Image (tube, grey):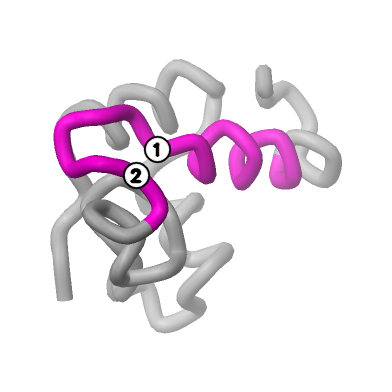
């Protein structure tokens, strides 16, 4: 398991979600099994994007949650 990075945690919080809520939505047991960048694919950094670059998946995942959770800014 990889812990969410500080940047991913910040982006999740800035959207109006909690990190715990974001995690539980994707992994109901509450244990983050995705990549540190916030993507649910545990191999995202280094595969979908360079490790130093921002993840393009996280804004999309937040946007999908914004469609079903009130008061979330995508």
Q: Secondary structure at mark 2?
A: loop
Q: Which residues are magenta?
A: 48-65
Image quadrant for the N terminus?
Answer: bottom left
Give x and y (percent) for residue 70. Answer: 79, 31
Image quadrant for the C terminus?
Answer: top right
User: Residue under circle 1?
Assistant: 55
Does residue 71 show up magenta in the picture? no
User: Residue under circle 2?
Assistant: 49
What residue is rendered at 30% in x and 69% in y?
43
Judging depth in this view, the residue of 62 and 31 nearest the camera is: 62
Give x and y (percent) for residue 13. Answer: 40, 26
Look at discs 1 and 2 and give the one toward the viewer: 2
> Eyeballing the image, is 12 above or below 14?
below
What residue is rendered at 70% in x and 45% in y?
65
Circles 1 and 2, Cβ within 8 Å, touching? The answer is yes
> Which circle's residue, 1 or 2, is located before the other in the chain?
2
Q: Residue furthest bottom?
A: 29
């Amino acid at each position: 398991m990889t812990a969410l990075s500080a940047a991913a945690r910040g982006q999740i919080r800035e959207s109006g979600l909690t990190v715990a809520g974001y995690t539980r939505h994707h992994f109901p047991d509450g244990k983050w099994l995705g990549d540190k960048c916030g993507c649910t694919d545990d191999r995202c950094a280094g595969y979908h994007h360079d490790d130093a670059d921002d993840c393009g998946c996280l804004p999309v995942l937040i946007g999908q949650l914004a469609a079903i959770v009130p008061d979330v800014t995508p």
